[in-house]
Image: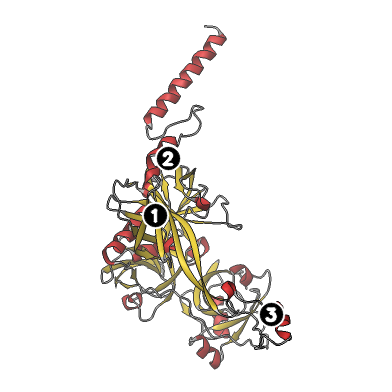
Amino acid sequence: MTAINSYRAMRSLGKVLAVTLFLATPSVALTGSGNLPDFADLAERQGPSVVNISTTMTIRQDTRAPQMPNIPEDDPAFDLFRRFFPPGPNGGMPGQPREQESRSLGSGFITGTDGYILTNAHVVDGADEVTVKLSDKREFKARVIGADKRTDVAVIKIEGRNLQPVALGNPGRLRVGEWVVAIGSPFGFESTVTAGIVSAKGRSLPQENFVPFIQTDVAINPGNSGGPLFNLKGEVVGINSQIYSRTGGFMGLSFAIPIDVAMDIAEQLKTSGKVTRGRIGVVIQEVTKELAETFGLPKPAGALVSAVDPEGPAAKAGVEAGDIILRFNGKAIANSGDLPRTVAGVRPGTRSTLQVWRKGSSRELGVMVAELNDDEGAPQRGQPRKRNDKLPPNVGKLGLGLSELTGTQRRQLDIKTGVVVEEVLQGGLAAKAGLRRGDVILQVNDEEVRSVDQFNQLLSQYEKRRRVALRVKRGDGTLFLPLQLDVGN
């Protein structure tokens, strides 16, 4: 066989192998070039299940403006003042409130032949009228069944026939790097199809404690909100909800609510019109490598308890600040974001078990889950702390200036013990640990701090350790910071 014939044979074999691999994954159709999947069939099949949602809301505006002096119309000065104080809209005088109609657009998808539609809560929030438009141009007035702002999920309903519901997929089977497709109405352009890949799973976003978001690089823009995210089998795996943007437009970071989370919320909204969640009454933070080492934990995992509601279920169960919750009802808590979602999914009044790490060993505690109120989690404003103008000396090589708590400060901060951080030297060990001026150090590891002298003594006891954990009160919350110790300090 000549070299040319050998080359042709190898090319033919490569084509056979490529075809064989493709046939092994029939849910993915490739384009003619063989490089990218073909989304045309998916878009054609699933397009009729995606709807355009438009809402109207009446906003009462106060058009307050400088008032025209009360001058008779026959006064020569009347025309002069009228030039600078023109009448309000529709001939009304300025300062009179007027009503304005606001319109917004979003997307959604049909989940059942009975007319139920899933979308985002922020799409229908405050709407006086909700209109749903199908891909076949039919329009319906929709009724809002319920909305949950915490997860940004809403259920609406239309009365229509020959509706095509979506098929639901399993977000748990999604793999990072897998192709996904969005269909929606960005900027009002209906039935727009965009595609990308799953960038990450289980993302926690600021102020979003109950949703393990699916991160994608699918192009999502205003108007896509509430629309479906499909896998290549044409199954909905998420609801497109948020984007990360500095301009208001798409920048490659989009976030979708997993469909299993959304459907659980939807069922509660359809059944009772509200969502019930569990709570145990703890404030938590992430367990870093440094903190894990400080607490003697083999590897970073779980949720570190930085504060406990004294009247909450966790306190009654014996949970203490400094405990690391490793499991809840047998389910591993890999990171701190897992705990709120896991507890929220438990029905209030359920007896549950906690596995916590405390002082180098694990133990189990029983806790009765309570109900999370809608207003819980809102930060409480604290009293400002008066700064001590007298600068205390630095503590060794930590670059840290401390002072005793005054009686007034104890009352303002509602604490009994601790020392106040007055100065943090830039580049020092305290600054590297993340301490800030105004922090109050409450504990060194599990030892309560009562005075500056006692704080120094505690550090001298731990000087042979690489790190200690400082429990710090900052503003209205508390957190643990790992402090690297300089041996011989």
Rounded to the nearest angstrom, the CA distance separating label 3 from label 2 is 59 Å
Give me the residue at 37% from left, 53% from top: 259
Q: Which residue is mark 2?
A: 43
Percent position of residue 5, x then y = 53, 9
Sequence-wise, which precedes: disc 2 or disc 1? 2
380 vs 396, left or right, is left
- The relative height of residue 388 versus residue 113 in the rendered view (above or below) is below
Q: Are marks 1 and 3 in contact (CB under 8 Å)?
A: no
Horizontal placement of 415 versus 435: left or right? Answer: left
Q: Which residue extends farthest top?
A: 1
Q: Is residue 332 visible?
A: no
Residue placed furthest toward the front: 74
Q: Residues within 10 Å of mark 3 (few under 14, many from 20)?
A: some
Q: Nearer the viewer, mark 3 or mark 2?
A: 3
Left/right placement of residue 14 relative to residue 274 reads right
Amino acid beneath label 1: Val
- Specify which label sits upstream in the sequence, 1 or 3: 3
The residue depicted at 54 percent of the width and 14 percent of the height is: 7
Type of the residue with mark 3: Arg
**Residue type marked 2:** Ala
Comparing labels 2 and 1, the label whose residue is closer to the camera: 1
Q: Quadrant of residue 130?
A: bottom left
Which residue lies under the disc numbered 1? 132
Please state if 474 lies on the left or on the right of 52 as rendered.
right
Distance CA(mark 2)–CA(mark 1): 19 Å
Disc number placed over residue 255 in the picture, else none: none
Up the image or down, 258 lies above or below 342; here it is: above
Q: Position of residue 26 (x, y in %)?
A: 37, 32
